[in-house]
Amino acid sequence: MSIIEVKDLSFTYGINTPFEKKAVDDVNVCFNEGEVIGLIGHTGSGKSTFVQMLNGLIKPTSGQVLLEGKDIWEKPKEIRKIRFKVGMVFQYPEYQLFDETVYKDISFGPRNKGLNENEIDLTVRKAAKFVGLSDKLLNKSPFDLSGGEKRRAAIAGVIAMDPDVLVLDEPTAGLDPKGREVLLAQIMGYHKERKNTIFFVSHSMEDISRIADRVMVMNKGRLEMFDTPKNIFAQVEKIESMGLRVPQITKIITMLRERGYDLTDGVLTVEQAFSEVVNLLKREGVI
Amino acid sequence: MTRDIALGQFIPGKGIIHRMDARVKILLLITYIVLIFCAFNFVSLGIVTASVIAIILISDIPVKMYLKSLKVIIVIILITSILNIFYGSGDPLVQFGIFKITLEGIYRAIFVTVRIICLIFISSCLTFTTSPTDLTDAIERLMKPLKIFHIKVHEIAMMMTIALRFVPTLLEETDKIMSAQKARGADMESGGMIKKIKAMTPVLIPLFVSAFRRAYELAVAMECRCYQGGDGRTRMKVLKINKLDVACILVTVLFLVGVILCNIFFAAKI
Ligand SMILES: Nc1ncnc2c1ncn2[C@@H]1O[C@H](COP(=O)(O)OP(=O)(O)OP(=O)(O)O)[C@@H](O)[C@H]1O
Ligand SMILES: [Mg+2]
């Protein structure tokens, strides 16, 4: 069953001003429950705008977002309820931290949701564990954490609301390679345990190809492609014409194939490529 | 949401007023403010209003933007004009208890309303057509004589530039932080005054933190580029007065004379 259905969705910034700008243009798409969706697109292609419409932070200029079959703007007064169902982690979420301690900050969402103290304590600790924040850090001021720790605290703040759909807008931007790796693994660990739908915006094709079940490609506000990473990244020319690129390892394998090496198409990760090449070498009797 | 505020927002363009020297524009704005308050009867007020409308039309800015700038102060206009209606002396036209409406009161209300609207339009015209940097540059140049009194003109102008520069940035930041907190279920719309103020803490704290961070970073960046105040600093864009400016000054002076003559030759209404 599709958990979110998007119908003819459009959004224009600054309507009736000289700065009018169509950021999302007539998008139609469906997401299944438990899927990991990747969203890629050039800077300014409308990714952030699109995901903010999924939990009603922005009201669409036209079109609908259906959550479990119901239009989220059906009762505008109850839009807050939607925000607990569709959790949203913004680009650079560390700038939203505000409370005295990390613990209190993470508990902001669950408290707004109206949980009691016991439940709050439980969800906060669980969320902190998912993103690897130790108990010692929980009692610190969020302003005394390192950049990466702040990021994780902010993500925990959204996970703590236990949303059915978790939207992450470039969660790994600006982190060091190790930090990215760890955060990505933590998010996937969370997904495996909670089995909810994850929506992942990223500029890293490597990250996307590693975790996404299906990938949306946006260009100038339009949804250009929506398919499995394998099918998407097979269309190198189309992807590159939109100012994007395919994962480097995919490109290398494609080039090797063009030179006549017998490798399978649609290799997305280094691990896959490694076994492919080893198999080839074995077949040819080199090793 | 915060973006809807149109008051004081530069809109790039190539119209006549865009091309004028910012210093001249400021001086002419001051002249116009004097003019608006010098118009004592309907004829002179008519002339001033007509010229303000003319300026709006040649300013290459959509009229909608001007109307938007009125939205913010429409309440003030309404209150002052209603107060004025009841304020006049003379024979009452209508009377309820201690409140009476006189012809003079109605005249007053019309004058006040037209004056405020003209003031807003003409000052919006300056901020719509002049970039903040040009504006502060011009202010700095105009205040230069104050240096004799050991007033730090350059520093004041620099602070104004920076403040103006960061208004949109902070508005954008406020929007972003508000969205982020709303995404965590913050309820900023419902509840009474006190509840609403309380609900703003999760927005204000990150906003202050980031404002201080920006200030600190900016200071470091300025020091790295050897900024050391105004002495011996040259400009990239030198302000220059050209024919267009002279023409505009002449037209304004003509209006000034016209309004003064009208005041003398037609009986003063108020
Ligand atoms: N608050 C706003 N007001 C006006 N225009 C905006 C606003 N936010 C975004 N835009 C414009 O809308 C378009 C889409 O922006 P959006 O932030 O959705 O892009 P994005 O795909 O998330 O880009 P990035 O990869 O850089 O985050 C851009 O052209 C941008 O300039
Ligand atoms: Mg974005």
Image (cartoon, rainbow, N blue to C red):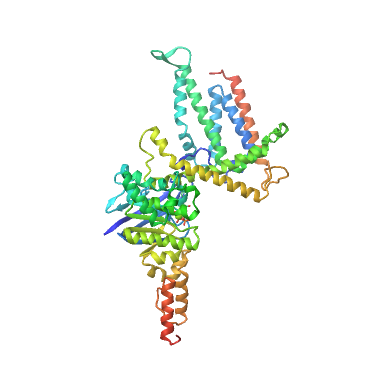
At a point 45% along the width and 76% down the height, the residue shown is A253
- The residue sitting at the bottom extreme is A285
Question: Depth check: A245 or B190 in front?
Answer: B190
Q: Nearer the viewer, residue A102 or B211?
A: A102
x and y percentages locating residue A157 in the rendered image: 40, 50
In the depicted structure, whether residue A240 falls above or below residue B243 = below
In the picture, measured across the screen, residue B120 lies left or right of residue B151, that is left
For residue B40, above or below residue A183 = above
The C terminus of chain A: image quadrant: bottom left
Q: Position of residue B23 (x, y in %)?
A: 65, 38
What is the tally of numbered marks visible in this picture? 0
User: In screen coordinates, is B225 left or right of A149?
Assistant: right
Q: Looking at the rendering, which quadrant does residue A182 occupy?
A: bottom left
Which of A149/B45 is in front? A149
Most foreground residue, A235 or A102: A102
Can residue B12 be seen?
A: no
**In the image, B6: left or right of A69?**
right
- Tell me if residue B224 can be seen: yes
Q: Which quadrant holds residue A274?
A: bottom left
What is the x, y in percent for residue A8? 34, 55
Of all residues, the one furthest to the front in this rendering is: A136
- Ligand 2's image quarter is bottom left
Would you identify the image quadrant in which residue B25 lies?
A: top right
